[in-house]
């Protein structure tokens, strides 16, 4: 089955090749990899404050605020995340940690302060909601480019920026989408817009990078939006106080610091 | 006025015929613009608070109406084969257009929170893949039983039944979707039996079935009425006229209804079946009189003039009283009932107008040859006349017994009236052997229930529902509600908190309770929200700002009476147990909506009936220029209503929507015979001047006209007894009963009263000659 799909993918790739023969700039696989690295593996580590707003169809919003630490153990490979919740107030000091291994299930831990308990939580489903928002875990930590087959569609303009438009289809049957259209910035390779389709011609979810800033010389999308058109709601995420290459020690990403947050990084 | 109409119709028959034809064609041209609406929710005004709140709740908690699909296997439903089938079936159902796939409640779509063997807390789909072994299948049952949110809802504790709840975007898709589900099931079932139930399917299917029945029963009743008329009058050309009058009144009425932009609702679809017999009534009187008199005059125009002279006033008043009965429905606060009442009233006026214009015009145009033998057969030896003579002689001898019997019937009926139970259930509009009824009974016997209703508790401020005291209070309310025999399950936020806490603390049974600290509640809810499940699932039970809780109250019976008792039980708890903090309770859900409109219907129709009763009495007193005769004329109507509704009380048939609406019909129709009888008896007496002669004459032409009407309408509705829909059977039975009872009361009780009061009502006088009479009338 897998070989079959790879052959199909290869066939698609080759049939589209003649037009773009020898055109490495338009190699969709390479572009998706580049953009994945730009979006999720910027520098070797990073710290930021995050404000997330989940806005329902009636315009009511739920706000969560947390500090987030990231360490890339291996570029494009293993990553570790540490999240310290500040809001909602009644869950402040709750902490959450993820060890991400591409192509494998993550490990996730949660610390519940009121009962002083660390609990491992399951990660079978990367397509499930990230902390109750319209983003999935996968949207936050990235979907590995080899899980889909990609086709270069065209070059285009988007909000005054030159973009590559790429269409992706999952190699194996996937709940998250059946088709995805990605608009990648030609210069910095950040994803500016991504549409997720399931049935029909209109997307069920749309990601947009609303604001891109250069921090420590690295282009970073600091305001992101995910719209769920089916549920008619959306989530925005705003990053602030971003610092790159802080030199976070791997020991921070252990169960011990779930109970005792690393004060040197989290005020 | 009367003279003008008659002379015009007689002198210019073609003008009448052409005018009627043109107008009928005009209204018939409107019919293709028909817009059908089968949603019983529209029994309430669009801005009715209960209805707005229901929509608000469904929007806020993202809840859809459900179709319930169930499978029952006596050997146990939890085996790998059956669960495999269910998995495949749900997969295909989720592809159906109009199904809210994300919100399907089924073993293969709902999330369950649990701790796996490594102590990892997992929120994941209960049955992601079909189980490989029966042991695995059994484990799924155990998990359902261990989750208070799923227990009873998805499976019966004995494992014999499994339920799937299919949310749909709109109620009026439910019949189509149910059909597609049936096809999918047929492809996957390996012998086990599936059932499809739920209020939306019942209501939607009823609407569709109703129109089918309508298309069948209205023409059928028309045909039988035609055949009976033919039997009585033996002249096809003559009896075609009342049929044309009936069909034209229906076309004018429905045409105007559509032209004015009204939708054809379940109620208004009944207009033809009500109008046809009412429209025919007047014509029967005319033909009957024409038939009995024609051989006397042997001249068309003279016979017509005489017939119309005798009948004009009684026909005007019988039509007006029926109009009053139906127009009174305009007072009810239920829009479809109002539309129904107003348009039936319009149709009756049309029918009256056509009866007094079209019938004479039509008769004038008939060739004299075709009328040669009309009414020639000797009536005195026909069974009808013989029967009427028997009644005449019986009454003369036993009038005291008739009066006594009437008094007894009134008393017994009063007892029956007291026993009337107001109740309705759209599912029970189908006969008990209908697949939807069978499914309803089977699923509700095994599972928590197919009637989903919602009790929303509003704490008024953000995070109010994270308070442990409030949660404990709500939990007590849930347990209180579940004590009702009609509540299969009351599920809510407390169940989720308890379940999360239980799993968090390694399945410690002591922890299966609401924690003491508000912060712990908040963190456990947050844990549920972030541990991988669909956050939307949580917000079907609590508002996103945690200010409101939505209790899912699942009922196993949709009878309004049962729903009412559950609502009352909640009120009782809330008033007897003060809440720890401010808490406002309000209901939503289709069953609840049904009790709201039933309440309006019952009170609205009671007011309509009483007021039209009063109006009719005033009209009668005016018509007979005598309050005493007015009172007497109300007797057949009162006894008919009491006897019919008393009988309903005794039989134990619930007083439901059709029965409530039919009270206006009963009132409008059962006065008719009394009007004819009294008015024409008085006319006869003016001719004879002698009571004995008058008395005998009552049972000739007048008696025959009334009896023919009774038989034609009553028998015309007999086929409706065999309808597949209960309300149709009810309507048919009512027409039958109204005709039989009011006919019998008129022919038995009124003559008996006349005998008693003969000195006052029928004084000896000089007989008026024909000439004086005609002069007076003009």
Image: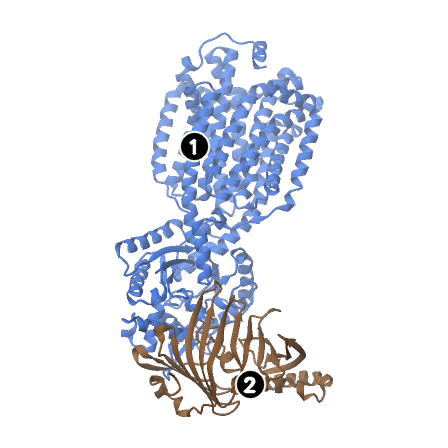
| Letter of the blue chain | B
The residue tagged with tag 1: helix, strand or loop?
helix
Badge 2 and badge 1 both on one subunit: no
Tell me the residue that label 2 is attached to: A38
Q: Residue at x 58, y 78 (%)?
A: A192
Q: In the figure, residue B443 lies in which quadrant? A: bottom left
Mark 1 is surrounded, within 10 Å at the Cα level, by few (under 14), some (14 to 19) or many (20 or more) other residues, namely: some
Q: Quadrant of the N terminus of chain A?
A: bottom right
Rendered view: B31 above or below B494: above
> Disc 1: which chain?
B
Tell me the residue that label 1 is attached to: B611
Q: Nearer the viewer, residue B2 or B203?
A: B2
x%, y% of residue A184? 61, 80
| Letter of the brown chain | A
x%, y% of residue B585? 35, 56
Single out the mark in the foreground, 2 or 1. 2
Direction top: furthest residue: B766
Mark 2 is surrounded, within 10 Å at the Cα level, by few (under 14), some (14 to 19) or many (20 or more) other residues, namely: some
x%, y% of residue B540? 42, 65
x%, y% of residue B27? 65, 39
Q: Nearer the viewer, residue B591 or B217?
A: B591
Q: Residue at x 56, y 36 (%)?
A: B275
Rendered view: B82 above or below B756: below
Q: Nearer the viewer, residue A222 or B14?
A: A222
């Amino acid at each position: 089955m897998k070989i079959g799909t790879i052959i199909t993918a290869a066939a698609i790739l080759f049939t589209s090749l003649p037009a773009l023969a020898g055109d490495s700039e338009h190699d969709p696989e390479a572009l998706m990899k580049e953009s994945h690295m730009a979006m999720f593996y910027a520098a070797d580590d990073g710290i930021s404050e995050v404000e997330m707003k989940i806005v329902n169809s009636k315009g009511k919003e739920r706000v969560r605020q947390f500090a987030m630490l990231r360490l890339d153990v291996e570029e494009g490979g293993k990553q570790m995340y540490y999240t310290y919740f500040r809001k909602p107030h009644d869950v402040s000091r709750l902490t959450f940690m993820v060890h991400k291994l591409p192509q494998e299930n993550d490990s996730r831990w949660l610390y519940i302060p009121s009962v002083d308990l660390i609990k491992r939580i399951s990660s079978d489903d990367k397509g499930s909601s990230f902390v109750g928002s319209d983003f999935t875990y996968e949207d936050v930590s990235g979907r590995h480019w080899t899980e889909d087959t990609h086709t270069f569609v065209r070059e285009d303009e988007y909000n005054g920026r030159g973009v590559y438009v790429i269409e992706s289809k999952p190699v194996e049957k996937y709940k998250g989408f059946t088709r995805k259209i990605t608009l990648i910035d030609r210069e910095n390779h950040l994803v500016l817009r991504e549409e997720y389709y399931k049935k029909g011609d209109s997307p069920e979810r749309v990601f947009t990078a609303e604001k891109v800033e250069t921090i420590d010389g690295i282009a970073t999308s600091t305001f992101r939006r995910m719209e769920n058109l089916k549920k008619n709601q959306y989530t925005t995420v705003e990053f602030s106080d971003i610092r790159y290459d802080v030199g976070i020690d791997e020991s921070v990403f252990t169960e011990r610091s779930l109970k005792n947050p690393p004060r040197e990084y989290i005020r | 006025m009367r003279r003008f109409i008659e002379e015009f119709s007689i002198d210019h028959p073609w003008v009448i015929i052409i005018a009627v034809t043109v107008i009928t064609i005009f209204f018939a041209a409107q019919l293709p613009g028909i817009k059908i609406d089968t949603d019983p929710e529209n029994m309430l005004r669009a801005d009715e608070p209960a209805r707005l709140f229901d929509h608000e709740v469904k929007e806020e908690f993202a809840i859809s109406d459900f179709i319930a699909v169930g499978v029952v296997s006596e050997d146990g439903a939890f085996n790998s084969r059956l669960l495999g089938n269910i998995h495949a079936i749900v997969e295909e159902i989720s592809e159906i257009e109009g199904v809210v796939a994300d919100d399907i409640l089924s073993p293969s779509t709902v999330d369950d929170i649990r701790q796996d063997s490594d102590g990892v807390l997992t929120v994941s789909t209960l049955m992601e893949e079909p189980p490989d072994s029966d042991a695995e299948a059994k484990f799924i049952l155990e998990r359902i039983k261990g989750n208070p949110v799923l227990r009873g809802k998805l499976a019966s504790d004995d494992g014999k039944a499994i339920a799937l709840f299919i949310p749909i975007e709109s109620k009026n898709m439910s019949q189509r979707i149910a059909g597609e589900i049936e096809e999918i099931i047929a492809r996957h079932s390996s012998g086990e039996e599936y059932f499809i139930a739920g209020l939306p399917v019942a209501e939607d299917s009823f609407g569709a079935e109703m129109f089918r029945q309508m298309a069948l029963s209205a023409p059928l009743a028309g045909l039988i009425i035609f055949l009976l008329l033919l039997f009585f009058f033996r002249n096809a050309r003559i009896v075609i006229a009342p049929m044309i009058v009936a069909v034209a009144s229906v076309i004018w009425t429905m045409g105007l209804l559509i032209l004015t932009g009204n939708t054809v609702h379940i109620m208004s679809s009944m207009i033809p079946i009500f109008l046809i017999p009412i429209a025919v009534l007047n014509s029967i009187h005319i033909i009957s009189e024409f038939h009995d008199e024609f051989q006397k005059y042997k001249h068309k125009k003279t016979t017509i003039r005489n017939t119309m002279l005798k009948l004009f006033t009684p026909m005007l008043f019988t039509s007006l009283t029926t109009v009053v009965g139906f127009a009174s429905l305009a007072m009810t606060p239920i829009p479809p009932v109002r539309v129904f009442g107003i348009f039936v009233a319009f149709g009756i006026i049309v029918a009256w107008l056509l009866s007094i214009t079209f019938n004479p015009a039509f008769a004038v145009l008939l060739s004299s040859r075709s009328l040669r033998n009309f009414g020639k057969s000797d009536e005195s030896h026909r069974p009808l006349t013989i029967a009427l003579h028997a009644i005449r002689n019986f009454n003369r001898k036993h009038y005291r017994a008739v009066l006594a019997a009437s008094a007894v019937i009134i008393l017994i009926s009063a007892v029956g009236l007291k026993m009337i139970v107001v109740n309705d259930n759209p599912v029970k509009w189908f006969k008990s052997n209908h697949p939807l009824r069978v499914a309803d009974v089977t699923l509700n016997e095994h599972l928590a229930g197919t009637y989903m209703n919602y009790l929303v508790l509003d704490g008024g401020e953000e995070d109010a529902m994270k308070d442990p005291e409030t949660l404990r209070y709500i939990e007590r309310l849930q347990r209180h509600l579940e004590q009702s025999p009609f509540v299969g399950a009351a599920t809510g936020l407390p169940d989720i908190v308890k379940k999360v806490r239980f799993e968090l603390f390694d399945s410690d049974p002591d922890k299966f309770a609401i924690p003491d600290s508000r912060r712990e509640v908040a963190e456990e809810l947050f844990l549920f929200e972030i541990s991988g499940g669909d956050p939307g699932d949580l917000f079907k039970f609590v508002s996103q700002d945690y200010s409101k809780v939505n209790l899912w109250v699942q009922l196993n019976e949709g009878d309004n009476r049962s729903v009412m008792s559950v609502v009352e039980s909640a009120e009782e708890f809330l008033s007897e147990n003060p809440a720890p903090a401010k808490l406002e309770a309000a209901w939503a859900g289709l069953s609840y909506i049904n009790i709201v409109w039933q309440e309006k219907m019952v009170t609205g129709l009671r007011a309509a009936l009483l007021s039209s009763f009063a109006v009719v009495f005033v009209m009668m007193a005016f018509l007979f220029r005598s309050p005493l005769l007015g009172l007497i004329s109300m007797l057949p109507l009162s006894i008919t209503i009491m006897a019919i509704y008393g009988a309903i009380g005794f039989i134990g048939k619930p007083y439901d929507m059709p029965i409530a609406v039919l009270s206006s019909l009963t009132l409008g129709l059962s006065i008719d015979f009394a009007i004819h009888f009294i008015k024409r008896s008085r006319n006869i007496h003016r001719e004879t001047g002698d009571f004995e002669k008058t008395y005998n004459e009552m049972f000739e032409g007048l008696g025959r006209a009334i009896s023919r009407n009774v038989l034609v309408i009553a028998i015309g509705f007999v086929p409706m007894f065999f309808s597949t829909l209960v309300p149709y059977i009810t309507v048919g039975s009512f027409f039958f009963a109204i005709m039989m009872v009011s006919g019998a009361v008129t022919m038995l009780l009124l003559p008996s009263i006349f005998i008693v009061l003969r000195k006052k009502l029928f004084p000896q006088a000089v007989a008026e000659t024909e000439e004086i009479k005609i002069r007076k009338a003009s």
